[in-house]
Amino acid sequence: MRKPILLQLLSLSLATVALPVAASERAPNIVLILADDLGFSDIQSYGSEINTPALDTLAQQGMRFSNYHTAASCAPTRAMLLTGVDSHRNGVPNIPEAMPGSQRSAPNYQGVLSKGVVTVATLLRDAGYHTYMSGKWHLGKSPDLLPSQRGFDRTVALADTGADNWEQRPYLPMYKAANWYADGEPHTLPEDFYSSRYLVDKAIEFIDSNRDDGKPFFSYLAFQAVHIPVQAPREFTERYLDRYEKGWTELRAERARRARELGLVPPDADFLTMPTTADWNALSEAERRHYAKRMAVYAGMIEAMDHHIGRLIDHLKAIGEYDNTVFVFTSDNGPEASDPVGQIGWPLQLWLWGTGYNRDYDTLGERSSFTVIGPGFASAAASPLAYYKFYAGEGGMRVPLIIAGPGISKGLSPALTYVTDITPTLLALSGARTPAPTFEPITGKNLRPLLQGTREDVRTENDVIGYELGGNAALFKGDYKIVLNRSPVGDDTWRLFNIRRDPGETRDLATAERERLQSMLADYNAYVRDNNVLPVPDGYDQRRQVTLNSIRARSPELTLGAGALLLGIGGTIAVWQRRRKRV
């Protein structure tokens, strides 16, 4: 018999209070690991064929979540992950690179982490933790917005949305340089840099710097893997060279089958074929060969990340800290389907050529290579879910979450969980305090009751999670979700799904359960009002806006370049005309 709703609410409110660690106990270390653009089925414990032994061991020793959601783009997720506050209240409702001009004047649309929120690093540092960060930040690059000013004692951080994995150079022309910082100062990467190896090296260095003082540490490890450009050491790529020759459609079906077998989705869960998935057999042999190797590089990049996570785990065992460390592993959003070269065309091809990038088959993924997996393999990476990064379908928002460590039960949780839940969970596990009333309150839930096996859910059937990013929108309530995905991939129509039974979003219930749809739409409209969610302009496209903002940011240089080009063309014509007259 179910408890009355008032008792449920009371038990949940009590569960969200951080219980202090007993004085005789040492607070646990915390390692928060964030992959970039990793899909729902991209690691073996979530149905992948990719070798990920370090992460799979954590999954076996701790708890996996099959119904965990993030924002569908990196910076909004990162802001919510580190604060527990909704993206429309923490200053990062979209990445700044994609913010339309009509939104930039709003205080909550600055695209950088607001001073009105407190990071989990600050709260843990106040509770006696050493706090370290290595990896992608993307929450502000001015001196007062870098992680060294947001609660982290030691940092090496990439301020941009992405960068090359082999050397210090930008991956798109929107950036003049790859902006790395160490402890708040501009940083130069070493000659032998590879992102996953270097970020783990720095995490180990920071941990060892205070190893003997008895204080716990919080290490935030934010990988570039597997954000574009997709790059991996040759020895990792070579393990997968023959694996993807049958193409993306077969891979998507294989992963869906394994996800069912692992209990991540219901046994009868179906899945869609996305309209952006081309017919593999209609491609030329050369195209299939190139795409298959791109996916091999992607797999190699994931295995390389796992390899270096394993190095960190081995080091913690060697120094006697492993058994007192809580590990949290997740991704910032679903897989990246776009190909900037195909979308921007010859201007980007010229830029890539001018900066030394290539797409040669023989060296794909290696130094100076620029490659992506495209929409076909992105749909496979999200299997059996629909859509991918940027979109509000499950493939863009539902990603792996593994939590393991002392006091955490083993198992698989189907509970509806959200990225804002991570900060209150870490505060509860550590005994740290929540933010003072002068700051934005945490909007997420504490997952500790799930981790300790005392509850099956932390939300009631009436709790809602609202979401909007770039005009794509969703609202979760109980087992149900309403979702709107904008064109060109979506159809700009609100749809209703039972995502517990139908995580692939294959059976739209909007007509059959119209009353539920209308009730949830009213909840969404309340979310919009309460959080000052602004509409996007007509015709807004996130990728196109990134291009426009890039042109604006680099307009002085582009103007000079265009002027020089016109002068050169004019001079060539004048010389040709003078020669013609002589003849």
Image: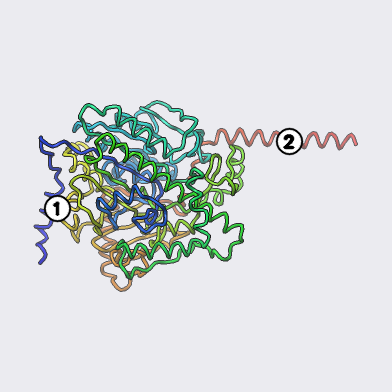
Quarter that holds the N terminus: bottom left
Q: Nearer the viewer, residue 186 or 286?
A: 286
Instruction: Answer few, some or many: residues within 10 Å of disc 2's Cα (few below 14, many 20 plus, some between 14 and 19).
Output: few
Q: Amino acid at mark 2?
A: Gly
Q: Earlier in the sequence, mark 2 or mark 1?
A: 1
Q: Secondary structure at mark 2?
A: helix
Look at the image and tell me whether residue 99 can be seen.
no
Which mark is nearer the camera, 2 or 1? Answer: 1
Quarter that holds the C terminus: top right
Left or right: where 468 falls relative to 569: left
Q: Nearer the viewer, residue 568 or 330?
A: 330
Left or right: where 441 falls relative to 501: left
> Distance from label 2 to label 1 (Cα)?
73 Å
Residue placed under numbered mark 1 in the picture: 12
363 relative to 377, above or below: above
Residue placed under numbered mark 2 in the picture: 570
Residue at 56% in and 48% down: 341
Residue at 45% in and 59% down: 487
Q: Amino acid at mark 1?
A: Leu
Look at the image and tell me whether residue 361 can be seen.
yes
Q: Position of residue 494 (x, y in %)?
A: 36, 63
478 relative to 335, above or below: below
